[in-house]
Image: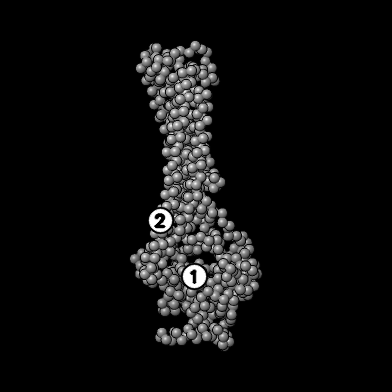
Amino acid sequence: MKNIFRILKFSLPYTNLIILNTLFNFLSVIFSLFSISMVIPILGILFGTIEPPENTNFDISSNNSIKDFFYKYIYTIQNDEGVVSALGFICLLVGVGTIFKNIFRYTALYCLTPIRNNVIRDIRKKLYSKTLNLPLINIFKFKKGDLVARMTSDITEVEWSIMGVLELFIKEPIHIIIFLSSLIYISPELTLISLVFLPITGFVITKISKSLKQSSLLSQNKIGDIISLIEESITNLKIIKGLNSYTTIISIFNKENESLKKINNHVLWRKDLASPMSEMLSTLVMVLIIWFGGKIVLTSNLDADSFIGFLVIFSQIIPPAKSLTTAFYSIQKGSASAERILNILNQPDRIEAKLKLTSMFSDKIEYKNLSFKYHQEININNINLEIKKGEKIAIVGESGCGKTTLIELLLKFYNPVSGNIFIDGKNINTLDTSSLFAIVTQNTLLFNDTIKNNLLIGCNNNTSFEQIKDATKKAHIDKTISQLDNGYNTIIGAKGNNLSGGERQRLAIARAILIDAPILILDEPTSSLDVESSKYIQNTLQKIKKNKTLITITHKLDTIIDYDKIILMKKGSILEQGTHEFLINKNGVYKKLYEIETLKSNEKN
């Protein structure tokens, strides 16, 4: 249950609404009891048992005196105006009580709605923010589809199974306590007998529901697996069709789907047991109370009309007790989803550096004895490297040699195993470096929004439209945008799918130019561009201001000939470094790679 309490902590900011909801529920139950208790004087009129009380000295603080006062009033109406008038008066009281009961019931629900929706909104907001802020190494513990499932189906489950029954845990205990108090007032002996059987009922229900949470957890995990499979299948649809692996993928999906069905069957069988089980036990308790109560009526001074009133009031305790039972099952089911949500929220945060740079990168970047491992595999091995302000640096090498990892460590996506990175002599782990970098990667980050809004991601709010147009001209994408029907207000689709690969890449480069950070990082920036666009981009990069530092990861060696330094990596280590001319004259690995690329380029021409 501790997971449930942690989820319910999200409701603390709305304590005032909870208090109002409790107050209105209390008033609703009071008027409900008032209406139902009127059955006793109605029965007294019908049975002719209402008589004037012997004691006429009324003390309002005494329960018996209140009853005597009320019965005398009814008796007076009955004598003065007739039995029908007395009955009509009581029916009027029932009607008024019912009206007030439902008014307060609605106001209680009115206060509950914002509690429920605000809490779910806050959980969703915190979960999304937490996910984006987690270190990548923690994110990679989860499948992408499973993360989506936790933010969608798990939150929905919490909304309906925990927040959905929150009102029951406020209203129904109030209902039971107040009605139980009235039963004690009518017959303490009979109430005590009925209370003997309630713990037995609760024990049976608790035993049955113990396995529900475990089954629900299996169900939510399986849903995460299925969403992951669907997401991977759609992403790799071309490959699936190209390899003709449709049958294999369908078979895997069907197997997972069948497993989910079986788990959900067990969950629902246990959940559906709540209502019939609680009804059966409640009915058995009612039968026992009728038997014991009948004996009391026959052998003591308990009036028949009071006994029938007792049964009517007790019967009104059964529905809230039954509701609490069903709610308990729902809570157990929702607890599994709460556990999966809290599993994300409990992940350690990325440690944010609080020290702001006093100046925007004025000297150099230094890698000192830097090493990094991922899944016990060495990705970076004892790197020592210096990048001065204003230099154009290229990092080259075969796939998997550690080029991208070297940059990701600079961006603090991961923490090194040993060694450190310094900017202007300060350890990057102590600095807030968020404003230092603009990045263009091979996989372009674009949202299903307008071109203008996609360009403004990462920019300050004061960016003018003229600056946007200037950046798109430098990235050789302005003419393409102007030819679109809505220009910069054109929606580009999910992941920018309404644009070609080259257009998406140029849009990302325009955004990086617009951000105007002192360090520009390009990871295969021209991989998706045609020859003409690639030349335009290279001209743009060559004209970058001298005070801007450029770090490029590329396989196209002919695009980095004029760079200040070229770093050749192999198996996580720096094999060679220097200018293009220096490395060619060295007659090492770089020269061989350049000659192979030149030969391939000549063959294409």
Q: Is residue 36 above or below residue 138?
A: above
Residue 472 in view: no
Q: Which residue, given by chain and number where applicable, does mark 1 sit on?
A: 440
Quadrant position of the C terminus in the picture: bottom left
Identify which residue is drawn at 50% across, 50% down. Answer: 214
Residue 7: mark = none
Identify which residue is drawn at 52% across, 30% down. Answer: 195
Determine the image quadrant of residue 352. bottom right
| Disc 2: CA contacts within 10 A as few (<14), some (14-19) or many (>=20) | few
Q: Which residue, given by chain and number where applicable, does mark 2 sit on?
A: 258
Q: CA distance from mark 1 to mark 2?
A: 43 Å
- Residue 120 in the image: state x and y as whole percent: 48, 48
Residue 50 in view: yes
User: Dot 1: what SS?
Assistant: strand
Asked if residue 129 lies left or right of residue 88, the reply is right
- Residue 424 in the image: state x and y as whole percent: 63, 70
Q: Is residue 336 above or below residue 549?
A: above
Identify which residue is drawn at 53% across, 55% down. Answer: 344
Quadrant position of the N terminus in the picture: top right
| Disc 1: CA contacts within 10 A as few (<14), some (14-19) or many (>=20) | many
Q: Is residue 600 above or below residue 516?
A: below
Q: Amino acid at mark 1?
A: Val
User: Dot 2: what SS?
Assistant: helix
* CB under 8 Å between discs 1 and 2: no
Asked if residue 238 lies left or right of residue 209, the reply is left
- Residue extending farthest to the left is 485
- Residue 473 in the image: state x and y as whole percent: 43, 72
Determine the image quadrant of residue 568. bottom right
Tell me which numbered mark, 1 or 2, is placed earlier along the sequence. 2
Near-viewer residue (576 or 448): 576
- Residue 358 in the image: state x and y as whole percent: 62, 65
